[in-house]
Amino acid sequence: MNRRALYTSVVDPERRKTLLALIEIAEANSPTACWDDARAMDLLRSQSSAAELRELGMDERLVEHIFAESHAG
């Protein structure tokens, strides 16, 4: 189910496209995508903020998982 929010911030369209692609990878439910999921989450954590991902429509549980204290290093 694709529930993307209307994107209202002024952000470079290429950056937006990249973040949306990473969100799709991170949300994938494929046993073979495990490494890709982890890498996508690492990139989302380092290249965006929780607020930005929420605005792009990412599921709140995944946002919380990505920015959980246990991932901070």
Image (cartoon, rainbow, N blue to C red):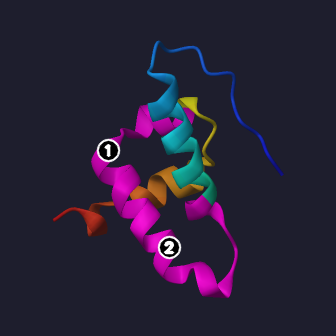
- On screen, residue 72 above or below 50: below
Number of numbered tags placed on the structure image: 2
Could you tell me which secondary element the residue under label 2 belongs to? helix
Q: Are marks 2 and 1 in contact (CB under 8 Å)?
A: no
- On screen, residue 41 above or below 23: below
From the image, tell me which residue sits under label 1: 47
> In terms of image quadrants, where is residue 27?
bottom right
> In terms of image quadrants, where is residue 49?
top left
- Seen at 54% across and 81% down, the residue is 34
- Seen at 71% across and 36% down, the residue is 4
Q: Which residues are magenta?
A: 25-54
**Residue 69, numbered circle:** none
Could you tell me which secondary element the residue under label 1 belongs to? helix
Q: Residue furthest front?
A: 14
Label 2 amino acid? Asp
Q: Is residue 47 magenta?
A: yes
From the image, tell me which residue sits under label 2: 36
Q: Residue furthest bottom?
A: 31
For the question of whether residue 3 can be seen, the reply is yes
- Seen at 28% across and 61% down, the residue is 69
Q: Picture coordinates of residue 56 (x, y %)? A: 58, 33
In the picture, the quarter occupied by the C terminus is: bottom left
Describe residue 2's horizontal placement relative to residue 15 as left or right: right
Q: Picture coordinates of residue 48 (x, y %)? A: 36, 40
- On screen, residue 54 above or below 64: above
Describe residue 23's horizontal placement relative to residue 3 as left or right: left
* C-alpha distance separating marks 2 and 1: 16 Å
